[in-house]
Amino acid sequence: MKLTKTLFATTALGAAATLVVADGHMAGDMTLVSWGGAYQASQQKAYVEPYLADNAGVNAVWDESSAEAVAKLRAMNEADNLTWDLVDVVASDAIRLCDEGLAMEIDHDELLAPAPDGTSASEDFGDLIVSDCFIPQIVYSTTVGYRTDAEGWSGTPDNICAIWDTENFPGKRSLEKRPIGNLEWALLCDGVAKDDIYDVLETDEGQAQAFAKLDAIKDQVVWWTAGADTPQLLADGEVVMGSTYNGRLFSLIVEQEQPVEMLWDAQVFDLDGWIIPAGLPEDRLARVKDFVRFATDTQRLADQSKFISYGPARASSAPLVSTHADLGIEMAPHMPTDPANAENTFLYNYEWWADYRDDLDAKFQAWLAQ
């Protein structure tokens, strides 16, 4: 698949791209929207703090509402009151926002810095540019963590279907409170071939099959809405296994040294990046363009991997991934794209979800309420 090829691309390159300052008057304040937790902290350290250090008098404020970005941008548009300047979203949400005219279409080569060797931004990001409005930042995965000291277990989980194996692995599980990922895993663990998942899920029968599989563990699930929830639930011993983003589990396991391990099997690859809301005033747009050029250059995206185990979206950044900023450990083996971790991956179909998300969100919430 094109995306998989891009994930593993590496190119030997030199120094970071040069910051090009935007023309005209620029606003002094930015409201950046992200996900909170360890991921947002990595953004703050890798490029917000360096940008502010280079731009005296500029102020950046975070809003941790990315999970609700589509609904909130729709509401802002309806009220004609756009308070956000730059929004971090998953790829499928970027496609939806672009299709609805709520995200600004951009010329990637005009807006973003080239690679240090002169390679254009569009070529450097390659197939990860999945929308005319999407500015890729990271490749991440949703995967599962489990406590190594869980009582009453028969062996150690070695595949994703351990989520449904309450006989050998008793205890509460945590799953995200949305259909994405859960429906794919449910069908996979109900015998549907990986390559057939989305064809099956397009049908009413396939959706019913996935929900029926989830019914089998519904009373054992704690539902999470924020990426930090599962790590906290695991740390507190309130669940014995649970899904979340691989970077959050890295923080829990490596930085906090909790008795937890990662289950990489059937990890769901996804993309995350920026969109610029459509309709920003000229001074705010100029500031955002200046910031995003800096924040997505080769060095800055490589720097982010010093703080969290997400793969940078630029091919030119991959060779610059080095050691953890505080622990000094090599970060490459902790990336979802590392060959040892990617023996059995599930490639999330963001285009499919952009088409079906609203309908399946409604069905999922109705199922939860039953």
Image (cartoon, rainbow, N blue to C red):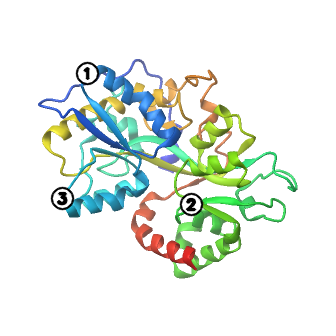
Say left or right for 330 vs 151: left
Helix or strand or loop: what does disc 3 sit on? Answer: loop
Helix or strand or loop: what does disc 2 sit on? Answer: loop
Helix or strand or loop: what does disc 1 sit on? Answer: loop
Say left or right for 348 vs 167: left
Q: Earlier in the sequence, mark 1 or mark 2?
A: 1
Q: Earlier in the sequence, mark 2 or mark 3?
A: 3
What is the C-alpha distance between the residues marked 3 and 1? 31 Å
Q: Is residue 240 visible?
A: yes
Structural crowding at the residue carrying mark 3, measured as other residues with C-alpha within 10 Å and reported as few (<14), some (14–19) or many (≥20): few
Contact, CB < 8 Å: mark 3 with mark 1?
Answer: no
Q: Position of residue 114 (x, y in %)?
A: 31, 29
Q: Earlier in the sequence, mark 3 or mark 1?
A: 1
Q: Residue at x 78, y 53 (%)?
A: 157
Q: Position of residue 183 (x, y in %)?
A: 58, 67
Q: Which residue of the protein is positioned furthest toward the left in this rendering?
A: 24
Say left or right for 134 vs 305: left
Question: What's the amino acid at mark 1?
Answer: Ala
What is the C-alpha distance between the residues marked 1 and 2? 42 Å
Q: Which residue of the protein is positioned furthest toward the top in this rendering?
A: 15
Say left or right for 367 vs 104: right
Task: Give the residue at mark 1.
Answer: 56
Question: What's the amino acid at mark 3?
Answer: Asp
Task: Give the residue at mark 2.
Answer: 181
Question: What's the amino acid at mark 2?
Answer: Gly
Q: Which mark is residue 80?
A: 3
* Image quadrant in which you'd find residue 28: top left
In front here: 279 or 203?
279
